[in-house]
Image (cartoon, rainbow, N blue to C red):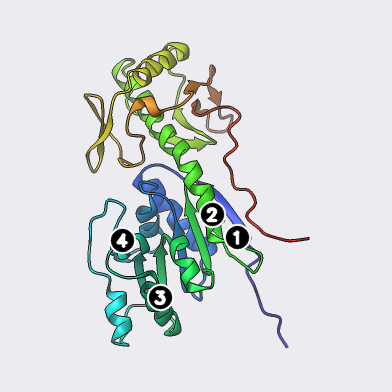
């Protein structure tokens, strides 16, 4: 008799990158590392502008989304018609619970999802935390996106969708602040110091990293002061198009146009580390920016509910 093979994953945590290309790549990595063909119910949890739709497209290439975070109805949800007619066709369906609540009761959404699962179809459910109480069972895999992307394989001890919800909704604010502060810094590096936009962008807790192939010539305290002056003026930060944002009157390139605070004044406690960090292997010079209070500890905690 063979022992059943089970995935030992409790949860994995990744920085939630900014920009479409980096989110697509992370989605592909999540699929390769954490999804099995037998995983039929995938729960996605995150606030508007967190990048759920982009992450889903990277994780499930070719999947047609029924709705996105901008509230644009890309196509009618085929799950309801197919489930009602008992002619479920595609292997994978997508459904946005918050959007569908305008047309269906939660119990109806749950019923359609259960019909698909009984036919061994996969359903990717955005805002799974809202549907969970009406399903009565957890997803095979939960994916939450806030400041971090949390990938969990629940068991009887958790994590519950509400636990993931609490974390990602609490932390997405730091990601939006960091992205806005990063773009303000990039704007100044380009406009005031004549550097082209750096190609290397990475993440740290409550912050960002900008990499340079050689030591840049700008004065970091002066750069920080110039950024803080823009923040103090509380200028609006708005999408200009799909790949550009406006910071006040300035337009700059950005592929994560919705992952921003509404105005610069909402960026809290911005600072740049006073010295560049040098990667000893690549010899890159790294500029590190931080946001939020130094004592903030909005992380992933209390995910499992083991009662002693």
Q: Pointer 1: what residue?
A: 159
Residue 162: x percent and y percent? 53, 57
Label 1 Cα crowd, 10 Å radius (few <14 / some 14-19 / many 20+)? many
Quarter of the C terminus within the rendering: bottom right
Residue at 37%, 31% (x, y): give it. 180
Vertical side of 133 occupied by 233: above or below: above
Residue on which the image places disc 3: 113
The reply, left or right, for residue 210 in relation to residue 68 is right
User: 295 left or right of 256?
Assistant: right
Percent coordinates x, y for residue 209 in the rendering:
48, 31
Name the secondary structure under disc 3: helix
Quick one: SS at disc 2? helix
At x 26% / y 54%, what residue is drawn?
71
Question: From where the camera sits, is residue 121 visible?
Answer: no
Specify which label sits upstream in the sequence, 1 or 4.
Answer: 4
Mark 1 or mark 3: name the one nearer the start of the chain: 3
Q: Is residue 52 above or below residue 114?
A: above
Q: Is residue 274 above or below residue 78?
A: above
Q: Are marks 4 and 3 in contact (CB under 8 Å)?
A: no
What separation in Å lies between label 1 and label 2 (alpha carbons)? Answer: 7 Å
Q: Residue at x 61, y 29 (%)?
A: 295
Q: Position of residue 228 (x, y in %)?
A: 40, 17
Real-space CA distance between mark 3 and mark 2, rounded to the nearest whole angstrom: 21 Å
């Amino acid at each position: 008799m063979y022992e059943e093979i089970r995935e030992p994953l409790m949860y994995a945590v990744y920085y939630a990158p900014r920009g479409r290309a980096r989110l697509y790549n992370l989605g592909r990595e999540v699929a390769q590392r954490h999804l099995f063909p037998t995983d039929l119910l995938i729960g996605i949890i995150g606030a508007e502008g967190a990048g759920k739709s982009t992450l889903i497209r990277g994780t499930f290439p070719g999947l047609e989304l029924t709705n996105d975070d901008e509230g644009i109805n890309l196509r009618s949800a085929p799950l309801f018609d197919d489930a009602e007619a008992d002619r479920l066709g595609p292997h994978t369906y997508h459904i946005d619970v918050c959007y569908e609540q305008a047309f269906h009761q939660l119990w109806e959404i749950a019923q359609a999802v259960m019909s698909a699962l009984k036919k061994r179809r996969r359903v990717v459910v955005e805002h799974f935390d809202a549907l969970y109480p009406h399903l009565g069972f957890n997803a095979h895999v939960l994916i939450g996106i806030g400041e971090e992307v949390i990938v969990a394989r629940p068991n009887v001890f958790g994590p519950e969708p509400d636990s993931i919800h609490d974390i990602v909704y609490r932390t997405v604010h730091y990601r939006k602040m960091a992205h806005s502060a990063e773009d303000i810094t990039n704007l100044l590096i380009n406009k005031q110091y004549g550097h082209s936009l750096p190609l290397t962008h990475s993440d740290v807790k409550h912050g960002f990293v900008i990499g340079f192939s050689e030591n840049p010539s700008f004065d970091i305290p002066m750069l920080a002061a110039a950024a803080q002056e823009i923040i103090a003026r509380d200028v609006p930060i708005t999408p200009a198009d799909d790949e550009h944002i406006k910071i006040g009157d300035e337009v700059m390139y950005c592929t994560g146009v919705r992952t921003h605070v509404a105005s610069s004044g909402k960026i809290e406690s911005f600072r740049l580390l006073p010295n560049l960090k040098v990667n000893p292997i690549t010899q890159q010079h790294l500029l590190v920016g931080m946001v939020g209070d130094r004592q903030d500890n909005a992380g992933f905690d209390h995910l499992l509910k083991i009662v002693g």
